[in-house]
Amino acid sequence: MGNRVRLGFLTPSSNTSLEPLTFEMLRGLPEVSAHFGRFRVTEISLKEAALGQFDNRKVIEAAQLLADARVDVIAWNGTSAGWLGLEADVVLCREITAATGIPATTSTLALQEVMKRAGQRTLGMVAPYLDVVMEKIIPNFGKGGMDIIAERHLNISVNWDFCQVGEDELTRMVRETATKKPDAITTYCTNLHAAHLVPQWEAETGIPVYDSVTTAVWQSLIMAGVDARRVKGWGRVFELQ
């Protein structure tokens, strides 16, 4: 047990997808375990109360509890930087590390790193979010070096409802996004039950698909010194190291 690698993930309180998907992703790595800390997130919108859910002080409190488990890395397994701005995640990671002494990352920063390593710039996005949220995400991603040239979204605001989006709907959205031939596609929301579908989408479209749950796991493994290429059957992202 002394050689066990512990990955810590900060989880939206109403999320029911990312934990089971993460456990399945790590099944082939017996020395790696995943540990989760929650803080309250129930609505994704631009209302003041919804934006206040992501106050860094609340996130830091959850991170400090995860630190008690002596995890090797802490990842914010959420996509709030999409509408808050990618710099918000940079600041958050800096504050998590200052408070806990543990290196930190996020799903969005991991996506940015994946695309950088793969030499990719254009992106298709599949997301459940409101129109007004998408209007923030698109320019914020552009500033971060990820040009969204195609997207499909569902105009939903209740975070729990995201997990109810069916496989057929997700596949339709991925296919429609793929027609614009982006360098990569992202299923952008950690409460979409999508990561397990990535291999079939990649096989059908020929385009790499980076799910938000997957990118957080990929980056966490690398930061913890684990060869992410050992994860099999979850998409092309794990071919990068």
Image (tube, grey):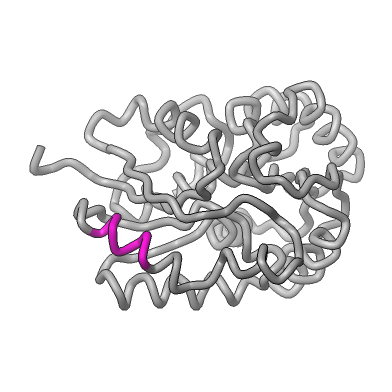
Q: How many marks?
A: 0
The x, y position of residue 44, in whole percent, is 70, 55
**Can you say which quadrant of the picture contains the N terminus?**
top left
Q: Residue furthest front?
A: 49
Residue at image coords 69%, 63%: 82
- Quarter of the view holding residue 161: top right
Left or right of residue 182, residue 202 in this image: left
Residue 152 or residue 111, whichever sits in front: 152
* Magenta region includes residue 65: yes
Left or right of residue 61, residue 213 in this image: right
The x, y position of residue 74, in whole percent, is 36, 57
Task: Give the answer, above or below, for where 110 lies relative to 89.
Answer: above
The x, y position of residue 10, in whole percent, is 43, 53
Q: Which residues are magenta?
A: 61-67
Residue at image coords 55%, 60%: 113
Residue at image coords 62%, 42%: 211
Left or right of residue 138, residue 80 in this image: left
Residue at image coords 38%, 33%: 230
The x, y position of residue 228, in whole percent, is 40, 42
Question: What predominant SS class does the magenta segment belong to?
Answer: helix
Left or right of residue 137, residue 65 in this image: left
* Magenta region includes residue 240: no
Residue 174 or residue 82, whichever sits in front: 82
